[in-house]
Amino acid sequence: MKGRTVAILALLAGLGLALLVAANQLLAGRIEAGRQAADERALLDLLPAGSYDNHPLTRPIPLPPSELLGSPPPPSAWLATREGVPVAVLLPATAKGYEGPIRLLLAIRPDGRLLAMKVLGHRETPGIGDRMEPARSPWLRTFTDASLAGHPEAEWRVKADNGQFDQIAGATITSRAVVSATQHALQFFDGHRQQLLGSAGQASP
């Protein structure tokens, strides 16, 4: 009788352990799925809803080292497509801000025009650098549709330097850094268009 009790307890313990392992695996899967969803929201919210039908983050495009994308250089970009046709390239870049690096993400159309951009992180002075955030200021939206073809070299400056782009009040150095990084990212895109867009890169959405 005692041996039977021990066997039953061992069986119950084994079942409990199996259930615990299964629960942990299920929970880990949900945590990973949640993390991936958060990453997608952070990186893909530049793209209009319904404008693409692939999963860009699952196929990163390795980037060659380039000073045009700032330091440290980003390791990869991502391509959004719809029915196999390129919609936009998501290209990270880093600007050299007043207090440290400003990490940017640009969504660039296949024709080289800027669709949208956002700040992923910065160390600029609170209250000043925050003005780069869409909720605080529409400043970044002034870059929409900017392109190398549409803006000659001399225009890629803030208006305080006789350029085309507005600057954030009280943050001219930060503004200069973002304008310069945007121009350089578009130059990188222009020089690596085939690699970034792939074989379908000749088509436009």
Image: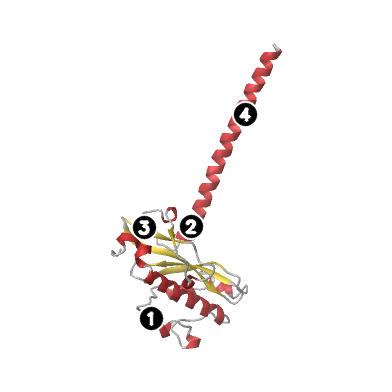
Question: Residue furthest toward the front?
Answer: 65
- Residue position for label 3: 52
Q: Is residue 155 visible?
A: yes
Label 4: state its secondary structure: helix
Amino acid beneath label 3: Tyr
Q: Is residue 27 above or below residue 171?
A: above
Residue sitting at 60 percent across and 26 percent down?
Answer: 15
Amino acid beneath label 4: Gly
Verify CB contact (< 8 Å) between mark 4 and mark 2. Answer: no
Q: Is residue 109 visible?
A: no
First in sequence, mark 1 or 3: give its number. Answer: 3
Q: Nearer the viewer, residue 179 or 137?
A: 179
Amino acid beneath label 1: His
- Residue position for label 1: 151
Q: CA distance from mark 1 to mark 3?
A: 28 Å
- Residue position for label 4: 16
Label 3: state its secondary structure: loop
Q: Is residue 150 above or below residue 194?
A: below
Residue sitting at 34 percent across and 65 percent down?
Answer: 194
